[in-house]
Each structure stands twice: as C-alpha cells, then as structure tokens.
Image (spheres, grey):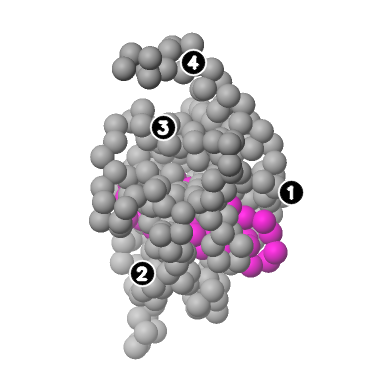
Amino acid sequence: MQEDIPSIDKKKSMMDERMKNIEKNMEKIKHKIVIISGKGGVGKTTVAVNLAISLASVGLRIGILDVDITGPNVLKMLGVNPEIKPRVEPGANKFYPVNGPLNIKVMSMAFLTQSSDEPVIWRGPMKMGAVRQFLGDAIWGELDYLVCDLPPGTSDEILDILQLIPDENVIIVSTPQEVALMDARKTIKMAQIMKRNVLGIIENMSGFKCPKCGEFIEIFGSGGAEKAAKDFKIQLLGKIPFETEIGQQGDQGLPFTLKYPDSESGKAFKMVVNRTREIIEK
C-alpha cells in the first residue's frame, strides 16, 4: 500500500510539469479575460457566457473555462450537454475541451460529475488542483481569447487563477446595490494588490424598462459603479439593463446576445464587448 503513495519528489515533479504545461498553453492564447465579482447572484456567468458568444460570433477562436468548481453553470447557459465527456489524448494524460456553440472550446467541472444534482464537496487544495488541470492538462490549442468564469469571493480558485495567469485582463461584475458594490470593491482591490490588469467594471441589472408603460425604473439604485470606477481609476465598461428574457434564455441554454441582439440589453452588451476589445487589442 505504501508503494502506491507518490513520494514527495514525485509529487513535486508532477507539479513542476503541470506548471510548465500551463505556461505553454497560455503562450498559445493571445488574450485571457477573467470575470470576477465580490458576491454571487450578480450575473457574472451570464456576462462570461455572452462575452464568449459575442467574441466567437465575429469569427474569433474562443475558449471558456468554468472555474466555479462547486457551482458550475456555464454548460447550462451555453446549452452544452454535460454527458458529453472531454476526449482524452491516449498515453499523454491530456484531454480536449468540448466543442460548444460557435466552436467555443468549453471546460467545466460539470463534465466530470455524474449528474447536475451531484455536489462537489472538496476543500481548497482539491479545487486548486482541478483548476491547474484545466489550465495545464487541457489541450486548448491556439485561441484569440480564453474567458474564465470565476466563483464569487477573493479566495482559493480566484487567488490561484490570478497567480497562474500573470498577463490576464480582469473584469469586475456588480449590480448597482450597495452591498454588491462593497464586495466588488474588495475584489478590485485584490486584483490591484496582485498587480493584475483590471480592464474595468460592468454594472449588470442596471435598471428596468417597463414593457407596458416604457418607464425606466432603477430597481437597485444607481451611480455606484461609476463611483467605484472613479475611486479605483478603472473604466466603467458599460451598464446592462435588467430584462426578464436574459434569465429565461440562460435557463434554456441560449445566450440572450444570440436570441435578442437588438434588445436594450443586447445593444448594451455589444457596446461592452466593443469597448473591451478596443482596450485589449489596442
């Protein structure tokens, strides 16, 4: 039994090899975007998925990595069947991400669970190990953009991604609520402390236009994202209004930027994408 346990030297060698693989993989990807938020429920995954779709729709080579190990939702929102398993490269301990809509390369913990109801009950080191496998053992190939959807907060997976991809571009997602902005500001500060390039902040659910009377209602307040952007000297990438169709399309696995490109949210999101590309590709 003792012989089956890897020695410390062997474990170190495996870790070193994976780190080299991560570096090689990232060199083949032109731009990396990390989507983070201080708290859950602000629409971070919605932003990540629709950003990937928008970029792929203009012919760019896109990958999306679901880094939320214990709560992966990217597959659901993209309409990718989790029963499709990543293809393994024989004899190489490597695997290929699954092809999603518009040939987006997709990797998520949801591929590795038995069902959508199965919880991933892991401590930090195991989650971090999975993140490193997704970055280093997956064969991403040549990409124009890799979009990483991270869980909320400022620990474990977030910290690992920020350390492993030094040339990443960070986008913060928040709602106008003060409680969401409080947490978003902590996330901005974390990225800046780690000397990462913070592209800017997106204000999601930024008001609601009544479909009957046309009145615009600021459900969660206003002005918080602008103030955070000013305080931290980052850009306000855009405001995406609240529309019921966004949630519905996410549940149906059809991103709203494909289904409703001419909606208020669709137009606002297009501006966010254009501004993001302009900053990154300049």
Q: Is residue 191 left or right of residue 248?
A: right
Of labels 2 and 3, earlier in sequence is 3
Task: Tell me residue 26's x, y (percent).
Answer: 64, 37
Sort mark 4 into few (<14), some (14-19) or many (20+) by Cα contacts within 10 Å: few
Residue with the mark numbered 3: 128
Q: CA distance from mark 4 to mark 2?
A: 44 Å
Q: CA distance from mark 2 to mark 3?
A: 28 Å
Location of residue 60 by image quarter:
bottom right
* Quadrant where the N terminus is found in the figure: top left
Residue with the mark numbered 4: 10
Residue with the mark numbered 2: 251
Q: Which residues are magenta?
A: 35-63
Of labels 4 and 2, earlier in sequence is 4
Q: Residue at 53%, 55% (x, y): give it.
A: 98
Of all residues, the one furthest to the right in this rendering is 282
Q: Is residue 199 visible?
A: no
Dot 2: element = helix
Q: Amino acid at mark 1?
A: Lys
Sort mark 2 into few (<14), some (14-19) or many (20+) by Cα contacts within 10 Å: some
Q: Nearer the viewer, mark 4 or mark 3?
A: 4
Q: Amino acid at mark 3?
A: Met
Q: Amino acid at mark 4?
A: Lys
Of all residues, the one furthest to the bottom in this rendering is 212
Q: Is residue 245 left or right of residue 134?
A: left
Q: CA distance from mark 4 to mark 3?
A: 19 Å
Q: Nearer the viewer, mark 4 or mark 2?
A: 4
Q: Residue at 43%, 63% (x, y): give it.
A: 81
Q: Amino acid at mark 2?
A: Asp
Q: CA distance from mark 1 to mark 2?
A: 35 Å
